[in-house]
Amino acid sequence: MSTQRPPTIDPQAARRWQQMPAAASPWLHEEVARRMEERLAWIKLQPQSWAHWEPVRGGLQAHALLVSRYPDAGCFVTEALAEKTSYAKKSIAKSWWQPARWTTQPTRFEMPPDGAVQMLWANMALHMVADPQGLMAQWHRALAADGFLMFSCLGPDSLQELRGLYQAMGWPAPSHDFTDMHDWGDMLAAAGFAEPVMDMERITLTFETPQRLLQELRGLGRNLHPQRFPGLRGRQWHGQLQQALAGAPLQLTFEVIYGHAFKPRPRLGMRAETVVSLAQMRETLSQRKNYPRDP
């Protein structure tokens, strides 16, 4: 596995994408979040506190599903930009007069302190960052020992129809490359996570017009490939693209990767001679015995 994953993302382009104004979560992201929320039924651990990582793009509608599943848990909503934090507040925060404000734990719109949450939820974010290892390290720090990460992202078979069309037209790739789920599993282990479990599915969307297809793509992300078109393209190129799309099936396939992993408790350091108290030994032996596992 390369230590520079993903290799085809331009860091400057990735920063520009992160700084774009807030907008409604794409339909695909909301649907993936709904499917990922169903996978929480596999996890027996009930978090006392959890973090929703970048929900504005990841799926604001899914936030209500998560609050319903964990009504007694506190929540941190984490966005990198103040504008997106404000947007999330308007969508998530309850008014003072709503009964739900008094029956659920408070929502804090900030980065969770180190070790503060037992679950971190990150939907459809990982494939759009230039430094995924750095992002995983942030997630690892935020999680408490024995806490777990739930995430999703796009896999390498995504946009295969569009890639084939661009290749046939002799154009640069329409998107940066997406990382394979096995490489994500390796990176999770390198970041300190334990027992990563990965699976995937393919979702195919169909569209009535080329214009609707391109509109959906603009909401999902940007082409972050370093060898993408170096400048702005004009109306003639845009017309060629729409004509080419009209002559092909109006559909896009997305490979969606789902993953979860645990943050293990730190192990006792091993030296030539190690002195361990009776209390430490009891705690170490009971950690795995008492921790609720997947069925």
Image: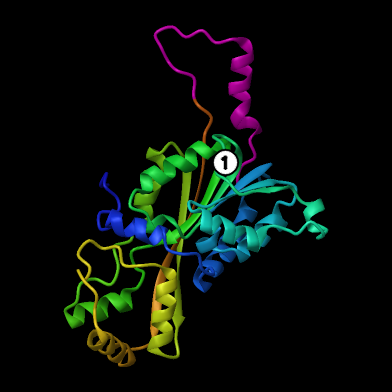
Q: Quadrant of residue 86?
A: bottom right
Instruction: Indicate the amino acid at tag 1.
Output: Pro
Q: Residue 121: percent from the left, percent from the top? A: 55, 52
Q: Residue 260: percent from the left, percent from the top? A: 51, 49
Q: Which residue does the numbered mark 1 point to in the structure image?
A: 112
Is 215 displayed left or right of 279 in the figure? Answer: left
User: Is residue 282 found inside the magenta-colored segment of the image?
Assistant: yes
Residue 283 drawn above or below residue 13: above
Q: Residue 53: percent from the left, percent from the top? A: 53, 52
User: Is residue 29 found inside the magenta-colored segment of the image?
Assistant: no
Residue 62 drawn above or below residue 238: above
Is 249 displayed left or right of 4 in the figure? Answer: right
The stretch of residues the image draws in magenta is 267-295
Q: Nearer the viewer, residue 100 or 196?
A: 100
Which residue corresponds to the image point at 34% horizontal and 48% vertical from the top-left? 131
Q: Nearer the viewer, residue 144 or 82?
A: 82
Using the rendered image of the protein, determine whether residue 235 is visible from the camera's viewpoint. yes
Q: Quadrant of residue 278?
A: top right
Q: Residue 38: percent from the left, percent from the top? A: 62, 61
Q: Nearer the viewer, residue 7 or 161?
A: 7
Which residue corresponds to the image point at 38% horizontal and 88% vertical from the top-left? 210
Numbered circles on residues, count: 1
Mark 1 neighbour density, 10 Å: few (under 14) some (14–19) many (20 or more): many
Q: Nearer the viewer, residue 250 or 110?
A: 110
Colour scheme of the picture: rainbow
Q: Secondary structure at mark 1?
A: loop
Residue 243 drawn above or below residue 138: below
